Amino acid sequence: MAHSCEILMCPPRYFEVTYRINPWMDPAQTVVDRTRAFAQWSALREALARSARIIEIAPLPGLPDMVFTANAGLVLRGQAVVSRFLHAERRGEEAPFRTFFEAHGFAVEVLPDEMFFEGAGDALFDRRSSILWAGSGWRSLPQGHEWLSRKLGCEVVSLELVDPRFYHLDTCFCPLADGALLYYPGAFSPASQASVEAHVAPRDRIAVSLEDALRFTCNAVNLGSRIALHAISLPLRQTLESRGFEVMETPLDEFLKAGGSAKCLTLRLDETLAPGFETNGADSRSPC
């Protein structure tokens, strides 16, 4: 079956926890079961392949976090903004991801010097408006948000992350296909919580509990009516199902050891703005 959605993934051949760049990582206490990690990654891949074409990039030794392709960059209408990582441990990923984008025909955009930006981990497109939600506070710099707005031609709403456990926006924030927002308010500054409330109607704000947030429920992949994630509480599952979503739980606890889950393991390659907001003649978003 042909799919209009395209997702980039990277097999976890070299995945391990050998350094600490977020509170979830503890190399002294963590042993990754790579066989189990590969089985979990493969199950996620299979679940997503029901709705999308999966494209793989080859993993490279010495880059254990390359599996988290959400941080490769940000894609919109064939443009790719390649990430610049804050931590030296991940900077080796920048060149292979840039090579991938160039080889696949993307127009590569290079960030200004000294501007840290960690791709779709910290930048998420709203599914019913022209907004690009952009996170800052731990990895990406807010100074880059205006640059992104000019370069990509979309409205950027900046959100400040204040809890180090939620170091990327996609760990605690997930715009859904019906215009709703799955998020953990406690991860954000009061001003950013107010900004979310100003842009999203109460009926469409789905605030998750700390328990769900810590199991990375918001780090979900939403393709059309399907949502793939690691784990979810029954009440929250029922809330999503009442809105017409099919919730697919697929265990990813090996990747939680590094502070990642379903969304972190994927990058959408076919992003456009929501219907009615394109300025280049592309007037409809992929059904994914």
Image (cartoon, rainbow, N blue to C red):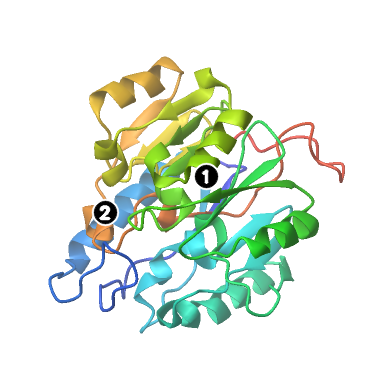
Q: Residue at x 31, y 41 (%)?
A: 213
- Observer able to see residue 159: yes
Q: Which residue is mark 1?
A: 52
**Residues under labels 1 and 2: Cα distance?**
18 Å
User: SS of the residue at dot 1?
Assistant: loop
Q: Residue at x 79, y 57 (%)?
A: 150
Q: Foreground residue, 189 or 59? A: 189
Asked if 221 appears above or below 86 in the picture, the reply is above
Q: Foreground residue, 112 or 160? A: 160
Asked if 172 appears above or below 122 in the picture, the reply is above
What x and y, as percent, mark residue 228? 38, 39
User: Looking at the rendering, in which quadrant would you find the C terminus?
Assistant: top right
Q: Residue at x 47, y 46 (%)?
A: 189
Whichever of callouts 1 and 2 sits on the residue coming sooner in the sequence is: 2
Q: Which residue is mark 2?
A: 40
Q: Is residue 174 left or right of residue 81?
A: left
